[in-house]
Structure formats: C-alpha cells, structure tokens
Image: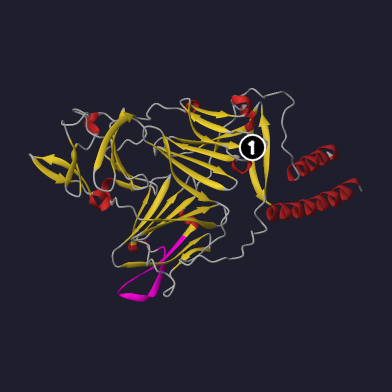
Amino acid sequence: MSVTVFRCIFLYILFLFPKNVVDSSSDSEEEPFPTVGKILSPESFKVFTYTENNLNNLKENEDSHYRFVNTGSSFSYEFNSDVKCNEVKYKDRLIWIYLPKESENGFPEKIIVDSHIFVVFLVFQDLLKLYKCDENICRLISEKQSSELNSSKLGLYTTDLENLVKLDPSKIQNNHGFEIHYNLSDQTNTLPDSNELIKCTEIQYSYQTLWKYGLNESGDKYPYKVYFNSFIGAIILDFQKIYVIYKYDGTHFHSSSTDALYGSTESEFKLIGENDLEITKTEYEIIKYPHDNAFAFQFKQDSRCTEIRFKDKSFWKNLNQEQVPELLYINFSKRLVMIQTQVSFLVYTYTDRWTLIFEGNTQLRDIADDKPQEIKHEEPKDITKDEYVFRLGKKPFRIMEFSSKTKTILVLIGIFLLFLIIVCLIIFIK
C-alpha cells in the first residue's frame, strides 16, 4: 500500500511541475497536429449605451439598444438611431469613452469584432478606428477616414412579377469590419445549388445599374455573395467559380473578372526560408478554427520564414529582421489573410491576387479616447501560462493550462494533502 501511495504522490508532483513530456521516437517528418484557435467572445466586451430620451440612464449590454449579429468568426453591434454608445470596455479595461470636449468624432454607429484575428472596429460617421487585442487589452493601431464608397448606396434587387423589389440588407448583410458580405444563400461553406439562391437579378449603386442578370459575362448565373470593400473601393460579385469586380475610381466603376478561391487549400501557401527552400514542418504549428474555412500557421521562435507565396506567386517578403512573422492567418470564406510580426499587423484581401489593404503598428500604447495620448501601461502580472502537454502515441495531447496564481494554489493544496498522507501513514504503521 505504501508503495502505491508514494507512486501517486510522485505522479502528482510531476503533474504540478511538468515539462513538455514526449516520447523518445523521432517525429520530425510527421504532420503538425492541429490545435483549435483561440477566439474572442462577446462575453469579454461591455457596451454602455443610453437613449436620447433618457440621458442619465446608462445601460450595460442592453440588447434592445442595438442589433447584434454573431457569425462565429465575427460579431457586431449596430446601434439604434436614438441610442448613443458612451463607453466600450474589453475585460473591464477601457477601449473607448466619449469625452464631450475631446471626442470630435461623436459616437460610434457600429462596433465590429473579428473573433479570429482579435481586431475591433469602431465605426463613426466619417471615421473608422481599429484596435488590436490580446488576451488582456485592446490597443488603438490605426484610424481611417471613411471611403467615398458608401454601403448605404448599394442596392440588391430581385424580380417579382416583372417588378424590381429591393432586398432588405438587414436580412442578408454581415459586416466583418474589413468587408461587408451580402449572403444570397443559406449555405456558407459549400457551393449552393442555383435553386437555393435568392435570385438577385440586378445590383445598383446610387441608383445606377452595375450588373443585371443575363447581360454580363456571368450569363445565366445568379451571384452567390456580394462583397462591399471600402478599403480597396470595390464591389465584388461572387459567382462560385469567378469574381466579377467593380472598382471605383472616385467617379466611375471599372469591371473585371478573375477566378474565385473556391477549392483552394492550405497546401497552395508556400512558406519560404533560406536558400529559397520551404521551411520544415517543425518550424510552425497548424491552427484550425471552428468557423469558416479558416486556419493559421503559428510560427515558432526559431522559424526563419522570409517569404510567403500563394500558387507560386509571392505576396509577402521579410525586408528586415524586425518583420519575422509570428502568425499567418488565412480565411478563404472571407477572402482574407492576416500576417502578424513583432511590430506590424498586415491584412490582405483577394481579388485576382492577395492585395495589402491595411497595415498597423502593434507596438503602440493603449489609447482610450479620441485624443491620442501616452498612457503608461503595465501588463498584468498573472498572464504567463504553463502548458501541460503529453503525447498519446505520436499525437500531442493538451491537458489544460494553469495561470501562475492557480498553480501556486495547487502547490499549496498538494503540500497540505502530502502532509495528511504522511500523518495517515504514520498512524497506519503504528
């Protein structure tokens, strides 16, 4: 019995103070085991609002004050016309607050959160603010003036008894921040049958016809989705196998077409290192996300990725040592790629190639109002986590993660239990 007890004590101590325990066999050639990507949840955010008729009654997360949409990979708050958003918090830390004398941009009309890449968009009438979040805080990384292209001027129409009927955008629209999607099918990750589509027969911008069923190169096809992208000034029609792109130059739209991304896989991305060779699979971890056709490459510290290619075409190169990539995120459903380095945050969208649409500096200090100001920021002490990783066969198995505070508590409990066991053994032996 005593041998069994001491064996249990030994195993418990190993559990409290583990290292990465692996088998002795070499697995340098095996496929990296995918892990599930972390996502932002609405529960991490607090939105404080009031109505114009009740200025002194500030409400927290009052769902009657806004339209809330959660697609899994993003969620958004669209405030009612009589509602003012006064304050936004992330994990009880301030992101933005309205200051009567300083807030020149007024109140945000919408808040959009990309759950996968940890980005928050505050949409004002003439301004867009972008914040990059980690597990504890959100930092302002960029401000962008509103584009000349305005989604409120976009009209999607169907035909009923030979009459054009405008589709209600609130029923088909998902705002993902970098792009607005109009879904004309209930199926999001598979190609729909034409009978399952909302038959959009005409698309207008500012009441001028951009596209009409049967008259363009799409022929007798109805669009599966429509994308509105103010970052590149384009309206993109998705016909499953091709994109028809209407690019706005400030006065006119110019159309073009290209092959769509459907059918593309992660293997079409090449991660290039020294001597123009692909880096080994031991230099990164593959992350899978539960929403969309989305995944990521999490680079390890010793990784030396210097170039990223898609279908053998280069779209990113490491021009200096500070640009070593930490994460490459790919979402085919959103036509979006994100590259995060030690100092920058790059976002690409796909038209006929991956085009850089946004670049932000991730080393900015946290700013919590409309007037940028230096705020001293101390990271919370309890943010380091120890990973408990074992292997079952050749597959890593992640048991759990504990913060340093939790670990300390467990150690104290373990010491107390050890003391009780020793006392019991002494009594038993006597």
User: Which residue is at 83% across, 41% downward?
Assistant: 6
Residue interval drawn in magenta = 46-61
Q: Say which quarter of the image contains residue 146.
A: bottom left
**Residue 37 seen in the figure:** yes
The residue sitting at 77% across, 51% down in the picture is: 414
In screen coordinates, is 390 left or right of 195?
Answer: right
Q: Main secondary structure of the magenta part?
A: strand
Where is residue 30? Give x, y as percent.
62, 23
Q: Residues within 10 Å of mark 1 (few under 14, many from 20)?
A: some
Q: Amino acid at mark 1?
A: Lys
Q: Depth check: give the residue in front, 202 or 286.
A: 202
Residue 380 lies, with reference to residue 342, above or below; the image says: below
Q: Is residue 33 above or below residue 248?
A: above
Q: At which x and y percent is residue 253?
A: 25, 42
On whether residue 56 falls in the magenta region, the answer is yes
Q: Where in the figure is residue 15, as x and y percent of width and height?
A: 73, 42
**Residue beneath the point at 53% across and 44% down:** 38
250 to 306, vertically: above or below: below
Residue 301 appears in which quarter of the rendering?
Answer: top right
Relative to 340, is 332 above or below? above
Number of numbered callouts drawn? 1
The residue tagged 1 is: 300
